Image: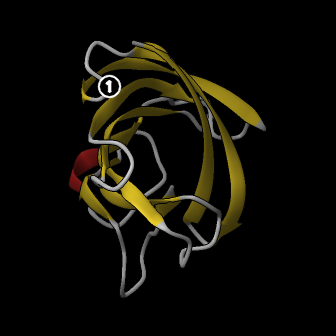
């Protein structure tokens, strides 16, 4: 998942900030809307498998933690449908876990979890590796 922030080709938009601030992207109260490419590998040029569409909110006053809520919308080549993720992403940890709370199409009634690892960071942008386990 390529979360591209504050560039000409940004896939993330700050829509709300603390006390109405629409410039501070990484502090308590910041709300980001995402439409991130999901690729097979960590390179942006890797084969596109879908888009991560949703939002994350900086929801901790004492830690770098996000409420991450998004849907992985897959292209129809291999899998048709979506997987929905919702939970805490404690971004400073090497490996984090987030629940899979549902799905559609090939993933209807999916339940499970995903491990998230940060593959790379450049400025505020990040490439995230998801290892997903689901039960249908």
- Where residue 54 sits, quadrant-wise, is top left
Q: Is residue 5 left or right of residue 80?
A: right
Q: Pick whichever, 14 or 133, lies toward us.
A: 133
Q: Quarter of the image for the C terminus: give it.
A: top left
Residue 31 sits above or below residue 75 on the image = above
Q: Is residue 75 visible?
A: yes
- Where residue 72 sits, quadrant-wise, is top left
Residue hosting label 1: 107
Q: Pick whichever, 24 or 7, lies toward us.
A: 7
Residue at screen point 65% across, 64% down: 42
- Report the residue that reaches farthest toward the right: 94
Q: Is residue 29 visible?
A: no
Residue at screen point 57% across, 58% down: 40
Q: Pick whichever, 9 or 14, lies toward us.
A: 9
Residue at screen point 47% across, 61% down: 3
Residue 9, percent from left and from top: 36, 82
Q: Residues within 10 Å of mark 1 (few under 14, many from 20)?
A: some
- Where residue 105 sits, quadrant-wise, is top left
Residue 82 sits above or below residue 47 on the image = above
Residue 24, percent from left and from top: 40, 61
Residue 64, percent from left and from top: 60, 38
Residue 46, percent from left and from top: 56, 72
Q: Is residue 89 left or right of residue 32?
A: right
SS label for mark 1:
loop
């Amino acid at each position: 998942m390529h979360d591209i922030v504050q560039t000409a080709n940004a896939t993330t938009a700050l829509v709300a900030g603390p006390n109405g601030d629409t410039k501070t992207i990484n502090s308590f109260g910041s709300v980001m809307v995402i439409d991130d490419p999901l690729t097979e590998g960590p390179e942006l040029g890797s084969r596109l498998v879908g888009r991560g569409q949703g939002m994350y909110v900086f929801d901790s006053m004492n830690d770098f933690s996000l409420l991450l809520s998004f849907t992985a919308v897959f292209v129809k080549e291999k899998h048709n449908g979506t997987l929905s993720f919702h939970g805490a992403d404690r971004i400073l940890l090497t490996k984090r876990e987030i629940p899979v709370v549902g799905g559609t199409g090939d993933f209807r009634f999916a339940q499970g979890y995903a491990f998230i690892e940060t593959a790379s960071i450049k400025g505020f942008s990040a490439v995230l590796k998801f290892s997903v386990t689901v039960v249908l």
